[in-house]
Every structure is written in C-alpha cells, then in structure tokens.
Image: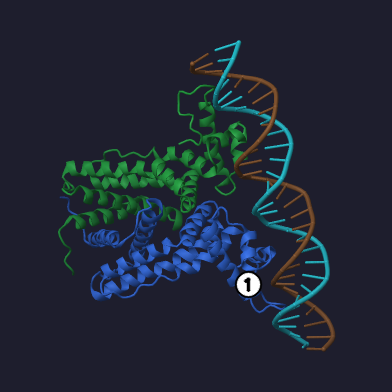
Chain colours: A blue, B green, C cyan, D brown
Amino acid sequence: MRRTPPCAGRKGRPRSAEADTAILEATRAALVDLGWSKLTMSDVAARAGVAKTTLYRRWAGKNELVVDAVAILFDELELPDRGSLAEDAQGVVLQFAALLERPEARTALMAVVAESTRDEALRTRIRHAIVDRQKRLVLEGRRRAQERGELPREADESAASRTADLIFDVVAGAVVHRSLVSAEPVDEEWARSFTVLLLGGLAAASRPAPSAG
Amino acid sequence: MRRTPPCAGRKGRPRSAEADTAILEATRAALVDLGWSKLTMSDVAARAGVAKTTLYRRWAGKNELVVDAVAILFDELELPDRGSLAEDAQGVVLQFAALLERPEARTALMAVVAESTRDEALRTRIRHAIVDRQKRLVLEGRRRAQERGELPREADESAASRTADLIFDVVAGAVVHRSLVSAEPVDEEWARSFTVLLLGGLAAASRPAPSAG
DNA sequence: GATATACGCTACGAGTCGTAGCGAAAGCTC
DNA sequence: GAGCTTTCGCTACGACTCGTAGCGTATATC
C-alpha cells in the first residue's frame, strides 16, 4: 500500500499512525472543498498539520494518496438481508448511490479512474483497494438468493464467475452513469425499475434459449 | 460552445477555422501522448502551431477544450440495421467499446466527468456535446424493434422516456465500467451475455408483474 | 480607407511540483 | 541508560504551468 516499505518490524522511529489518519482525513476534506484538479499536496499537508515532505515519504503522488483516502469509504457498503433478491439488490443500489452523493467519493473515483487509463500500477491499486473488494456484495447476494431458491446453483464454476462479473459491471456502471454522467437522481423509483430489469435479465439468462416474440 | 461569443456576422477579422481544427486535433494527440493530468495548454498550442493566447481566446480552460476535442469522436457511433434488436444492441455495445479503446476517448471522458462533479457549467456542456446526442441510438433501436414487433409500442409517453433513459444508463455504464474500471475486454462473448441480460430484462419489465419463484 | 477583430510573440507574477539538506525528536536494540 | 536508526518539521530550490497583459501586425467588414 505504501510507497516506501518499512516492512514492519524495522528499527528506528516508526511512522506516526496519527499522521496517517490525519493525512487521509485531510485529503477527503480537501476533495470536498477543492475537487480533484485544485487539490494540492501542499494544501493537504497544511490541513493535516504535517510537513509536505511527510506526504511524499508515504505516497508517490496525488493519485496514490487519493485512492487510499477514498478506498475506506467504499468498505462501508453492506448487504443486510432484506428477505429477497430484489430487495437486496435494490438496497445495495441505493447504498451505492448514497455513497456517490458524497463529493469526495464521486470526484475522487472518476478522477483516479481517468488517471489509471494511462497508469497500469494505479489501475491495479484501484482494483485491489476499491473494486475487487466490492464484488463480495454480488457474491453474497447470489449465495443468499440460491439458499432461498430464487436462483439456481450453477454447475459451471467459470460461467458463474463470469456472470458475477457481468452483474457487478452492470450494477456499478449503471449507478455511476446515472448519478455522475446523466446527473439524474438514483431514487427508489429508479432503483426499482433497474432491479426489475436486472432480475428479469438474470432469469432470462439462466433459461435455455430466448424465444422471440 | 465558445468562450467569447463572436455571434457570427460581426465585423473585423474572423477566427481561423483551420486553427480550430488544428487545435482540436492537437488536443486529441496530446491526450494520447500525455494523458489528462500532464496535458498542458502550452503543449497543445505548440502542437497546433498557434499561440497559447489563441487557445485562451476560444476556450476557458483545459476542461472545455477537451470536451470539444473528444465530443466529435462520439458522433461516429452508428446503429446499422442488423435485423434484430439483439443484433443491433450487441453491435452498438461493441462499437462503443471500440471507441473506449482509443486512449484519447477513454482518458478524456472520465477526466471531464470527474471535473464536472464540481462544475455545473461543465456538466451541462458535457451533456449537450456528448451524452444527450447518443441517446438517439437507444431511441432509434427501440423504434426499429417496435416496427419489427419485438417490443410493444408504449402508451405512456413519460414511462417510455424513463425506460429509454434507464437503458441508456445501463448500456453506457456497463460498457464503461467493464472497460475502464474492471479493465476487462468487451469482446463478442461479453457483448452477447450482456445483450441477453438486457433484453431479457426488458421483456420482464414490459410484462405485467413478476411472480416470485 | 476606416474600423474592428484575430493573431503571434514576449514577458510577467503567482502558484505548484518533487527533492535535498538540515537539526531535532522518537522509538528500537543492546 | 547508550547507541543506532528512522521519522519529522522546516527551509530552500530549480523547473514547470498557469492565465493575463501589452504590442505590432494581419485580415476581415462597413
């Protein structure tokens, strides 16, 4: 995660954990106030009450710092059991939308993704710190639905994995696009319509062959 | 579209159209070579063979310039009649994915969206120049499917509009997320799976009520 | 021809970047 | 405790970018 690897258990003075949290918190605050492009390392350092050099000792630059600063926000997402697959899906959609309402999350997510198109290392960092961690929601939702008998248990492991990836891209992509690009509200009504579309599609996909008409 | 409004038909020397196209072309080239954050106005001016001041006379800044530079790329999207709704949908998904393979498109789109989260004017600019123009693809696809009898003609105008918006967000969002965030290929196989999901969902959504399993 | 605008060029202050060097502080090991 | 190691805050630095202003010149309309 960190730039320099003090690899734990080294000699000498350890890095201040307080400074770490102060910096990450200051980064989120700066994102809210300034946005991505106007956020500067100097400003973050000043807000956190640390020297600018301390930032550069831990993170290679703005990209890496911001990824770590917002990654924790996405871990707040949960999947409480609401009794049915439809309710579970709708719930997580609204949760994700609420997260994207937070300025630091919406700004940072898009910005680092944009930068990652030209930075392989940053892309893997984003995947590990943010994206892959949230696939647990899809897997957990499916597991519950299978236990309820709402979805069939899949025999083909790799096909099941591909389906999970597909669902993840559809859900996350649609919510992000609706919220940030189309700039329309992700409210209960939209979430319901979207869930109907998604679950209907899943049902059709698990059936043998779609008959036209 | 432009910063200063020469409102057409004014007196004095008109702005060079050649400079316009040279600047936009240089911007796309610079995006390919440098990416978003390292792209500078000075560099674009040098590539285009114009003075830096000429850029600032026409665009307020990097954001606005890049929006105009990449907007034209999205107008290349077409919807050739492939005979069925499924084929049409799959075709446009692959087209969109191919567009997002171009570095200038993928980098610029995400970056300007990120900036737009804190800039209302920029957001409307993006919507007018890029997003809203592409909804034509959804509307055209639906019109054809209705003529073929694949989709019912909707009585409620506003519900039909909401459905079109939903489809647009799902398609564009899923492709963008798959391609840029998950960083997995949008190939024929994925496009087929996604299309099955989408069309199955549409069929379910147009049916009266889903009966639980 | 008069007027009005666009253009290229140069220069400028302000701000940011990422790094280096320093002395001091804080922890770990013996 | 002594000694070593690493971190910390601070200052300064050259390089770069930003957006603007001023100037003389080019090119259009009236």
Q: Quadrant of the N terminus of chain A?
A: bottom right
Examine the image and state in which quarter residue A180 appears.
bottom left
- Residue at (29% x, 45% y) in the render: B138
Callout 1: SS = helix
**Residue A1 shows in the view:** no
Q: Does residue C19 lie above or below B79 as drawn?
A: below
Q: Does residue A118 lie above or below B47 as drawn?
A: below
From the image, tell me which residue sits under label 1.
Answer: A19
- Residue at (61% x, 62% y) in the render: A44
Crowd class of label 1 (few under 14; some 14 to 19; many from 20; radius 10 Å) = some
Q: Does residue B120 lie above or below B76 as drawn?
A: below
Residue D25 pos. (x, y %): 66, 20
Camera-side residue: B50 or B158? B158
| Left or right position of A161 against B46 | left
Instruction: Identify residue type, mark 1.
Output: Ala
Residue A9 pos. (x, y %): 66, 79
> How many numbered marks does the figure carry?
1
- Residue at (47% x, 55% y) in the render: A110
